[in-house]
Image (cartoon, rainbow, N blue to C red):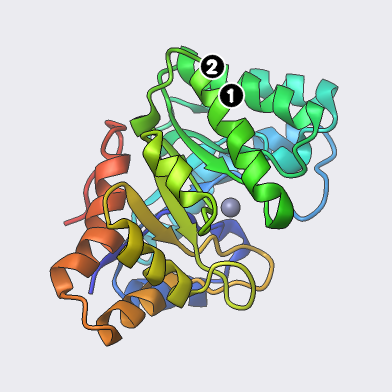
């Protein structure tokens, strides 16, 4: 079994997690920029974090033979302070040419606030200017459908953005159809106890097919499972799906999306 982890916040994980992922067939890991769990003090903290994502963490992953890629942005949870956001947005372009950077992400909305939407629009503009791929976080629970709609509208409003170069993460049963119908990629984030479980993710694959869909763990500093993708692959096997079907979802689909960035190398 081989797979790609398209969304792991590895700076918060241990070396044991790296070992567990690699020995379960992980062939590459991609790390979107995330909220630290607390508010960072100022723009320089973001510069340090972006350096960690583009210099230190790839070296740590390499010790386990794992290629590491990253995405750069200011997280929606950090978007309320517009002054800070403006400063961080000027730092981001310095990192977009780094050898392991795939694009701008995970941008999006958290509470669907006016400030979040404004910062989302600036990120979309930045991605368009620098011809970057986009990885989007959608809000959870009751705000998800409304937030997903706002995000798709913001992306569509920027004529330089092509839907096939954007992945909309954290889709669920009530948002996956609009994402796929409008030409975007859909990411299913697997959670251990709430939200999308492995069983629900495989149900969605059986209903909507495997085109333009991937699964990810989104493991971070909270309760999360770095091996969520291989666990979901086991669920597929137990349901009788053939190895080619499983390989497409877990390996070839994320490879295909990320190969739209010339810096991504499909793992051997
Ligand atoms: Zn995330």
Q: Tell me the quarter of the image containing the C terminus.
A: bottom left
Provide the secondary structure element on which disc 1 rests: helix
Count neighbours of disc 2 (C-alpha within 10 A) and say few if under 14, some if 14 to 19, many if 20 or more: few
Q: Name the spot of residue 61 as percent of width and height, x first.
A: 42, 59
Label 2 and label 1: CA atoms lie apart by: 5 Å
Residue 154 bears which disc, if any?
Answer: 1
Q: Is residue 114 above or below residue 198?
A: above
Asked if the residue under mark 1 is in contact with the one under mark 2, i.e. CB atoms within 8 Å, the reply is yes
Q: Name the spot of residue 117 as percent of width and height, x first.
A: 71, 27
Provide the secondary structure element on which disc 2 rests: helix
Q: Is 52 left or right of 237, judged from the image as shown?
A: right
Q: What residue sits 77% from the left and 43% below the top?
A: 111
Q: Nearer the viewer, residue 74 or 157?
A: 157
Q: What residue sits 53% from the left and 46% below the top?
A: 32
> What residue does disc 2 label?
157
Q: Is residue 23 above or below residue 39?
A: below
The furthest residue to the bottom: 238
Q: Is residue 128 above or below residue 153?
A: above
From this viewpoint, is residue 243 visible? yes
From this viewpoint, is residue 35 visible? no
Q: Nearer the viewer, residue 177 or 227?
A: 177
Q: Tell me the quarter of the image containing the N terminus.
A: bottom left
Check mark 1 vs ligand 1: CB closer than 8 Å? yes or no.
no
Q: What residue sits 75% from the left and 19% below the top?
A: 86
């Amino acid at each position: 079994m081989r797979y790609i982890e398209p969304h792991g916040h590895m700076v918060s994980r241990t070396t044991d997690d790296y070992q567990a992922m690699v020995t379960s067939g992980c062939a590459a890991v991609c790390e979107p920029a995330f909220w630290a769990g607390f508010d960072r003090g100022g723009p320089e903290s973001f510069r340090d974090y972006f350096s960690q994502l583009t210099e230190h963490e790839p070296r740590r992953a390499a010790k386990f033979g794992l290629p590491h890629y990253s995405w750069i942005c200011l997280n929606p949870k950090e978007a309320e302070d517009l002054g800070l956001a403006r400063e961080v947005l000027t730092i981001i372009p310095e990192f977009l040419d780094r050898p392991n950077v795939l694009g701008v992400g995970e941008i999006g909305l958290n509470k669907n606030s006016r400030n979040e939407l404004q910062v989302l629009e600036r990120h979309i503009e930045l991605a368009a200017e620098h011809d970057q791929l986009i990885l989007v976080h959608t809000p959870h629970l009751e705000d998800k459908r409304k937030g997903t709609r706002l995000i798709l509208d913001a992306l569509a409003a920027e004529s330089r953005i092509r839907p096939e170069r954007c992945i909309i993460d954290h889709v669920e049963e009530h948002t996956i159809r609009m994402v796929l119908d409008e030409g975007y990629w859909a990411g299913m984030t697997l959670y251990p106890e709430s939200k999308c479980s492995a069983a629900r993710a495989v149900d969605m694959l059986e209903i909507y097919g495997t085109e333009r869909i991937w699964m990810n763990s989104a493991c971070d500093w909270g309760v999360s499972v770095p091996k969520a993708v291989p666990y979901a692959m086991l669920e597929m096997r137990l349901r009788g799906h053939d190895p080619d079907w499983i390989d497409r979802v877990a390996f070839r689909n994320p490879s295909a999306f990320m190969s739209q960035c010339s810096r991504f190398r499909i793992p051997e």
